[in-house]
Image (tube, coloured by chain):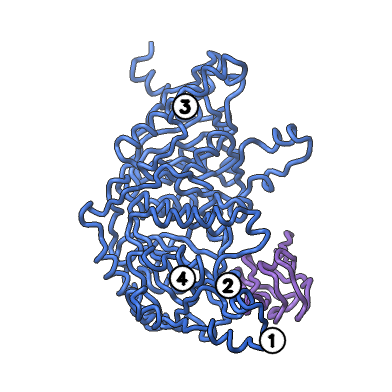
Chain colours: A purple, B blue
């Protein structure tokens, strides 16, 4: 089982987490939406997989490159 | 005594047997094609004419009998009916290492391709320089440095490469010198092997971490395309070449327009969110207006803020450069500059008109950007755009700000600029402008007056009124507009051939 670390592409804050732990997501799915530069920036799982955990919570600040979720495949 | 034709048949069978049944069986079991199978899958059936079948290792007599075709299968063949030159490394023969004879074979293929106007294809899988042939002063002197143009790329004809296994040395050099570089998952593209790297730096080196597909798709950007299998990689080369002319002195081929092209134009406006704070995937818009199924994205996992790819409009090849707000709002970083620069060089070198789609808040700025040479990268991109002699058409979908307005073809940096009614154009965010010029923040006394002065009309109508964009078009008119304007700007005086002012620019930045 390979784990996939999902990183934030931008600094900002977590606006909404729109997937659940345990959910299997398709490649290209949006896991959560960040608020950054006055825009709603999605965090996308390029490869898809099962959501193992989120390492951030809604309203929390995130930095660019920070791991925000872990998927398994 | 054997007849001449029996001797011929025996020598031919030996050469075509490659590294022998055991090695070939191991590859088959691993689901990997051998060099000859790869050539067969790459080209039109029955069109391969081999060059150098009877070549063998030239340096050491003891290697003559164990080096069929000297480990590199070379020849000419047709791809979609067009003549090409092909070199496929045969890893079962001495690790497809580079030797004197196969070096001459590659040299001949390249010379013929360049002088006769044929695309060049490299199928890479090589352990690097052959040992002990290259060792010592005499080895170096006799095997290396005998071709002063070996790595001089002038883009006379398109080069496409697939790295289909372990690839070190010249196999990697040809991969990155190519205009199109495919990596198969499991392959490694690197300067030298992980083993040698471990010896040199005295620490464990993981081959995939060093030169696997993820590194080249996401970090270096060398991989234009990642394939799951050999077959998919070879098909990707055929697809890439279908957009390209055979050489730089002709226009790209024209294909029939697939049925259903433009069928979704009525709904294209719905792909752009109503609220300007929301993002979208610009690739959905591209797919809607180009010929059905014709969008072939390059480097999709590298610098995702910018989308680059080949497509067709009315059967004719175009190069698409688009900001993608889906990633970081479309703000371009230094990787995006490099990705777009190399794509502009490709298009201009092979007479492919450029279509730019603009929606970005500007370049990414900050300490990290400066340390990554942002001014230099932005200017490389800008210089490439201004040196392009192919037709350029730019469409402003939404935001276009600051220097990025120029880089994305604003003003006279395109031959035609059109704006969707949703376009907004300005120098910077008016709130930032008030802070910079007046030192005022929202809530400060005088902020509102200063803001009103800065917050000038930034709508499409303003820039159209002074003819700094030539047209304002509705989203559903985009396909027809582009087809017509590309026709207006067709390079009739030169039969669709540009000046190729960047033909000697680097193939990677």
Residues marked 3 and 1, same chain:
yes
Q: Residues within 10 Å of mark 1 (few under 14, many from 20)?
A: few
How far apart are labels 3 and 2 at the CA level?
A: 48 Å
Tell me whether the residue at label 3 lies in contact with that at label 1, contact meaning CB atoms closer than 8 angstroms. no
Residues marked 2 and 4, same chain:
yes
At x 45%, y 33%, the residue is B73
Q: Secondary structure at mark 1?
A: loop
Label 4 lies in what chain?
B
Q: Residues within 10 Å of mark 2 (few under 14, many from 20)?
A: many
From the viewer's perspective, is the residue at label 1 or at label 4 nearer? 1
Q: Quadrant of residue B318?
A: bottom left
At x 39%, y 77%, the residue is B419
Task: Read off the residue under disc 4.
Answer: B358
How far apart are labels 4 and 3 at the CA level?
A: 46 Å
At x 74%, y 36%, the residue is B198
Label 3 lies in what chain?
B
From the viewer's perspective, is the residue at label 3 or at label 1 nearer? 1
What mark, if any, has residue B444 been given in the picture?
A: 1
Label 1 lies in what chain?
B
């Amino acid at each position: 089982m390979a784990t996939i670390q999902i990183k934030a592409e931008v600094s900002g804050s977590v606006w909404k987490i729109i997937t659940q732990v345990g959910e299997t997501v398709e490649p290209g799915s949006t896991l959560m939406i960040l608020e950054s530069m006055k825009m709603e920036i999605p965090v996308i799982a390029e490869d898809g997989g099962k959501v193992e955990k989120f390492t951030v919570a809604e309203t929390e600040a995130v930095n660019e490159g920070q791991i925000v979720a872990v998927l398994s495949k | 005594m054997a007849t001449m034709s029996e001797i011929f048949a025996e020598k031919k069978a030996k050469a075509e047997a490659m590294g022998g049944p055991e090695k070939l069986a191991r590859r088959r079991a691993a689901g990997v094609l051998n060099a000859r199978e790869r050539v067969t899958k790459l080209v039109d059936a029955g069109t391969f004419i081999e060059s150098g079948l009877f070549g063998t290792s030239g340096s050491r007599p003891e290697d003559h009998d164990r080096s069929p075709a000297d480990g590199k299968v070379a020849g000419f063949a047709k791809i979609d009916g067009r003549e090409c030159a092909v070199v496929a490394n045969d890893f079962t023969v001495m690790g497809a290492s580079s030797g004197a004879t196969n070096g001459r074979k590659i040299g001949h293929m390249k010379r013929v391709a360049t002088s006769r106007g044929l695309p060049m294809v490299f199928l890479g899988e090589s352990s690097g320089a052959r040992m002990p042939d290259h060792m010592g002063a005499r080895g170096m002197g006799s095997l290396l440095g005998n071709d002063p143009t070996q790595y001089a790329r002038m883009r006379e004809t398109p080069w496409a490469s697939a790295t289909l296994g372990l690839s070190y040395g010249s196999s990697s050099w040809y991969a990155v010198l190519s205009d199109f570089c495919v990596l198969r998952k499991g392959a490694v593209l690197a300067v030298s092997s992980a083993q040698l790297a471990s010896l040199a730096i005295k620490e464990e080196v993981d081959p995939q971490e060093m030169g696997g597909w993820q590194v080249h798709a996401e970090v270096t950007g060398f991989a234009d395309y990642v394939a799951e299998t050999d077959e998919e990689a070879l098909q990707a080369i055929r697809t890439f070449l279908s957009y390209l002319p055979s050489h730089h002195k002709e226009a790209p081929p024209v294909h029939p327009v697939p049925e259903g092209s433009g069928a979704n134009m009525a709904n294209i406006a719905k792909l752009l969110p109503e609220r300007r704070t929301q993002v979208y995937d610009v690739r959905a818009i591209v797919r809607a207006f180009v010929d059905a199924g014709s969008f072939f994205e390059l480097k999709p996992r590298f610098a995702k803020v910018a989308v680059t790819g080949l497509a067709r409009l009315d059967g004719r090849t175009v190069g698409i450069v688009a900001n993608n707000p889906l990633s970081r709002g479309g703000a371009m970083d230094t990787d995006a500059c490099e990705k777009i620069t190399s794509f502009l060089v490709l298009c201009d070198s092979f007479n492919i008109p450029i279509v730019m789609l603009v929606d970005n808040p500007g370049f990414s700025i900050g300490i990290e950007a400066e340390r990554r040479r942002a001014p230099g990268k932005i200017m490389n991109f800008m210089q490439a755009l201004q040196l392009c002699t192919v037709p350029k058409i730019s469409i402003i979908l939404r935001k276009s700000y600051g220097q990025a307005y120029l880089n994305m073809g604003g003003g006279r940096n395109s031959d035609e600029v059109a704006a969707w009614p949703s376009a907004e154009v300005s120098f910077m965010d008016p709130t930032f402008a008030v802070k910079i010029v007046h030192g005022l923040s929202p809530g400060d006394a005088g902020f509102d007056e200063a803001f009103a002065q800065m917050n000038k009309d930034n709508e499409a109508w303003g820039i159209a009124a002074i003819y700094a964009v030539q047209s304002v078009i509705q989203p559903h008119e985009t396909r027809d507009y582009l087809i017509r304007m590309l026709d207006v700007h067709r390079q009739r005086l030169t039969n669709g051939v540009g000046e190729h002012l960047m033909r000697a620019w680097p193939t990677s930045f």
